[in-house]
Image (cartoon, rainbow, N blue to C red):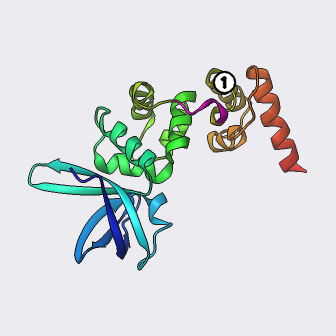
Amino acid sequence: MIGFVAGTLAEVRPAGDAGGEVTVDVGGVGYRCRVPSRSLASLRPGQEVRLHTHLHAREGALDLFGFCDRAERDCFEALLGAAGVGPRLALAILSVHGPEQLRGAVASGDRDALCAVPGIGRRTAERLLVELRARLEPPAPAEAGPDAVAVAEARAALEALGYRADEVRELLSGLPATDGVEDVVRAALARLAVRVR
């Protein structure tokens, strides 16, 4: 098992929705690692890096996946444990959502957040929400904001009022802790009113 690679970044190659590939020079040996797009954006050739890694063995091949922090690698491994999720899809999910965003989406039952990932439809998103709830720890209380049930109910209420799923997700992100669904809807509408001005 390879826990991490540390060295000079020799090459960075974007590869579409499912991230990209980097080559890390470790004492004259180049380790090729597939990385999520979110990590790829912060990596530049010539910089010193330490990537937390996951070695994925499949028939006839060994693939090395690299992550800028341990939380991202832990999420990747939790995703691999879900039925029907292979490395490519797990990487695509982490290319769209960071670990905290993903844990928050799972905790609040935000199906639309998972549907934003290329290759995930409504049914797959619903199944993943159920499976990942047991695999991913919810965000820490300070990060969680409003109660997850209140957020899910507020999301349904705002969508019923005609707001698009992406608008609702943006309105509900990062709201302060509140007591109930009415408070969440009120805070989201207040945020919208400020933007309209």
Corner quadrant of residue 166: top right
Residue 103 falls left or right of residue 191: left
Residue 191 falls left or right of residue 52: right
Q: Residue 11, can we see it?
A: no
Corner quadrant of residue 66: bottom left
User: How many numbered dots are placed on residues in this image?
Assistant: 1
Magenta part of the chain: 138-142
Q: Which residue is mark 1?
A: 147
Direction right: furthest residue:
197
The secondary structure that dominates the magenta segment is loop
Name which residue lies at 23% across and 51% down.
Answer: 55
Corner quadrant of residue 75: top left
Query: Is the residue 52 above or below the residue 187 in the image?
Result: below
Where residue 136 sits: x, y (%)?
44, 32
Helix, strand or loop for disc 1: loop
Report crowding for label 1: few under 14, some 14 to 19, many 20 or more residues within 10 A (C-alpha).
some
Where residue 105 sits: x, y (%)?
54, 35
Query: Is the residue 182 above or below the residue 55 in the image?
Result: above
Q: Residue 126, can we see it?
A: yes
User: Which of 166 and 49 lies nearest the eye of the viewer?
Assistant: 49
Name which residue lies at 64% across and 40% down.
Answer: 169
Where residue 123 sits: x, y (%)?
41, 31
Name which residue lies at 38% across and 47% down.
Answer: 73
Residue 148 falls left or right of residue 194: left
Q: Identify residue type, mark 1.
A: Asp
Where residue 162 sits: x, y (%)?
72, 34
